Amino acid sequence: MSAHTQQEIPGEPVDLTELRRVANDGTALRYALMELAAETPDVIALGRGDPDMDTPEHIIAAAQEAVRSGLADRPAPPSGLPELRAAIAEKLRRDNNIPADDDCVLVTSGGQEALFLIMQALLNPGDEVLVPDPRYTSYDQAIEQAGGKMVMVGTEPEDDFDLLPAAVEAALTPRTKALLIVSPNNPTGGVVSEESRRAIAELAKQHDFIVISDEIYEKFVYPPARRLSMAALPDMFERTITLNGVSKAYCMTGWRVGYVAAPPDFIAALTALKTATTGPTAAVGQYAALAAIAGPQDAVDAFYAIYAQRRQLLMEGLTAIGLTYSEPQGGFFVYTNAASSGLSAFELSYRLLKEGHVLIFPGTAFGEKWRDWLRISYLQPAEELQKALWRMEAVLGRLKREG
Ligand SMILES: Cc1ncc(COP(=O)(O)O)c(C=O)c1O
């Protein structure tokens, strides 16, 4: 890699004024950086968590057929196409061991809508939701809009970002309504261990709180980590809301199809909200999701193999340029400690973008205490990742020379 260290990249005056305005709002900060990246020539985007590969051909063909045949023109019920709900329920029983019937499923316009509806239906003003720190900050808006209060539960690199039952227990109060589990996690790539899950399930029963289990990255778990659905644990189905979707598993972010699985009365409450707001999810997307979930899964295996290889490349590259990280056990991200750069992650990500033309989000976009951390997504082909590593090395080298 050292041959490329010599590669000179033009410096630009550091002007963080604009960015500082949004520095304390994780979602706004991510969007501001993406706007800057859009104006940056030859940028390598390792920011967003949206898969870069194409939606598999058989899924596209199913959508085309739904459009051509006129099926996509017909209004779907607000809860989702019956055949899609049935396919999701079957998948949950078969793959996740979740005892879901069709009426336990609501199809949504992406996981994003699902999490908003869940919070609206679940929370009364002042209710507390325990959220692992660092976090995917779209949850903030959903919880706040419903009048709820986020209570952070720390997760740490020393524990491979596992969610520890003791930390959950310490954060409980009489106002605790729910605990959010995102496993594999965005941004850390952590997977909640089986031991922790089982202990957390016992806490949920003992202290009577709901678990919201965001399993959107479930297809990408790297051994020895194993996936395990909270709703599959004994007596947990009735107190677990499972959230998932097709965006990550099938490279379908733009199709906007997600789903919620929960007991039928909660699904009925969500459906009433969905009917009053967005109505049914676009039928064309639902037919595509049906082909994805009920069809052959070889494409997911192929995606898995590609991500596993990129993950390895990125980890080795980061080690070679002197950055440390907690080995990600799932998802698409390496959460990296960049303290050795001597800059805050906020400033470093700005300089990586301006001088190295690499977009990486600072840890502060996922929680204020993560000033030394970067979330690097590996949603670019291996050659681009390699190029990004060389560029990062060059910027870090310059920072060192600047002292
Ligand atoms: C943890 C997590 N949950 C939910 C979502 C929502 O995904 P979508 O709305 O594309 O289904 C995302 C998207 O990045 C995510 O990272």
Image (tube, helix red, strand yellow):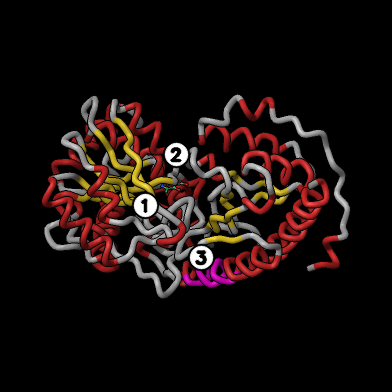
Residue named by callout 1: 182
Where is 357 relative to 160, above or below? above
Say which residue appears at 67% left-offset and 44% top-offset: 343
Q: Quadrant of residue 325?
A: bottom right
- Seen from the viewer's position, the closer of residues 303 and 397 is 397
User: Label 3 sits on what residue type?
Assistant: Glu
Where is 271 relative to 259, above or below? above
Q: Earlier in the sequence, mark 3 or mark 1?
A: 1
Mark 3 lies on a secondary structure that is loop
Pointer 2 and pointer 3: residues touching (CB < 8 Å)?
no
Where is 8 relative to 38, above or below? below
Name the spot of residue 226 as percent of width and height, x first: 36, 70
Q: Magenta segment, which residues? A: 301-309
* Mark 3 or 1: the one toward you: 3
User: Label 1 sits on what residue type?
Assistant: Val
Q: Is residue 383 visible?
A: yes
Say which residue appears at 27% left-offset and 49% top-offset: 168
Q: Which quarter shows the N terminus?
A: bottom right
